[in-house]
Image (spheres, rainbow, N blue to C red):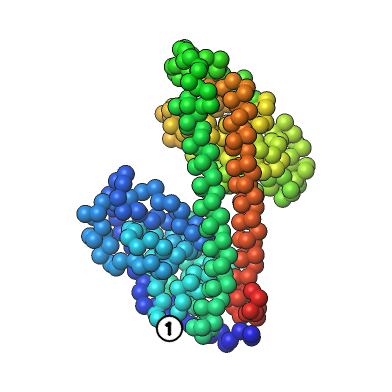
Amino acid sequence: MIMGIFQKVKLGDILEALIDYRGKTPKKIKFGIPLITAKIVKNGFIDEPKEFIAESDYNSWMTRGLPQIGDIVLTTEAPLGEVAKIKNSKIALAQRIVTLRGKQGMLSNDYLKYFLTSPVGQGRLKERGTGTTVLGIKQSELRLVEVDLPDFQTQIRIASVLSAYDDLIENNEKRIKALEEMAQLLYTEWFVKFKFPGHEKVKMVDSGTEYGMVPEGWEVKRLKDVGRVVTGKTPPTSNLENFDGEVLFIKTPDVHGNIFVLETEQTLSEIGASTQSLKLLPAKTVFVSCIGTLGAVGITSKTSQTNQQINALMLNDNSDYCFFYLFAKSLKQRLVGLGSNGATMGNVNKDKFENINIVYPREEIKNLFFKATANLFDEILSLQKHNKNLSKTRDFLIPQLVTGKRELKNDL
């Protein structure tokens, strides 16, 4: 089927609603109505909200209009241009976000999402953006952004093709989350509650550490006793030959939403990596951010290096990586305590990190745990790789379909 004619139409002419939530930030509480902020709208999806507002504040905060399921949210500043679809009925939206709703029969919300995600859509948003330090777009300028618009039925078909990829990605993400939760529950049961196989026959003894009573035969060790701590480093940036190669160069933002890090914004060349070869981390090495953002935890998917904000632990027995990853996920509050030395930015140096205590089980329990969790982590890695391929295919199709450069075939 040949694509229909695409017309350039001003966004404001095809919207039923454009609701702007600029203003003061509402008072936040621990539980309540989820608050969608600009920082959790990423890569076409809305991350799980971490902030909430009270039911009593909802109506007064949302006086400009209530979002509906299926509406599109767009971040208008810091950053400009993140787009996602609303899937929950009752949410609150923070400042720096607008809600967009297309006119019935004229603009498909899903099509709008993919158009704004495309390089063309992103370019048109930025063309109308203003600001020297932070780029943002005013509502009046947003209404003037031109959309490449085919007939409504073609919009529906394009959105259907592309949303099939997003649905698969979202389902895989749910599976990844469930697998991690299964591993975390097992870790908590065995190594926090000490309800491991055969625990009934094991006496509890005083460890003489902050852990108190631990099973007899278990040890409290320092991290440096179970592996080698490696603090990352950045090769000289003045030499461009150090970068743009095949070696992943992990920074804290690369960990966002990932367990295994499959790709990084910046990479090192063989030359750059070789200048600090002792910093090379093999696959399935667990690392923790220890400067700035404290406690972000990830696992390398292949040989990698990190920057100086990250400490990694090259374990003496690499089969312990599942155990150590789950332990490291519990470290955030401890790291905050270690790193809060009066400075504005938290900093846990190598010495502090490698002297953190960890309860280490007997060999047979450790091996049983690895057998119980290794397949879970292998499946997580496989699902992440699948999602990476799905994302690449979708991102390849988006600019071609929303500009009419590709025929919409029945086999897509």
Q: Is residue 237 above or below residue 356?
A: below
Q: Quadrant of the N terminus?
A: bottom right
- Where does residue 234 sit, x and y in percent of width and height? 65, 39
Q: Residues within 10 Å of mark 1 (few under 14, many from 20)?
A: few
In this rendering, the answer to whether 158 lies above or below 34 is: below
Residue type, numbered disc 1: Gly
User: Can you see residue 103?
Assistant: yes
Image x and y of residue 217, in percent: 56, 15
Residue for point 53% across, 26% down: 197
Residue picked out by circle 1: 105
Q: Residue at x 63, y 28 (%)?
A: 367
Image quadrant containing the C terminus: bottom right
Q: Nearer the viewer, residue 182 or 43?
A: 182
Coordinates of residue 65 in the picture (x, y in percent)? 29, 68
Which type of secondary structure does the marked residue at label 1 adopt? loop
Q: In this image, 263 relative to 108: left or right? A: right
Q: Is 60 in front, or is 344?
A: 60
Position in image of residue 261 (x %, y %): 62, 46
Q: Residue at x 53, y 38 (%)?
A: 183
Residue sitting at x 26%, y 51%: 54
Quarter holding residue 237: top right
Q: Quadrant of residue 103?
A: bottom left
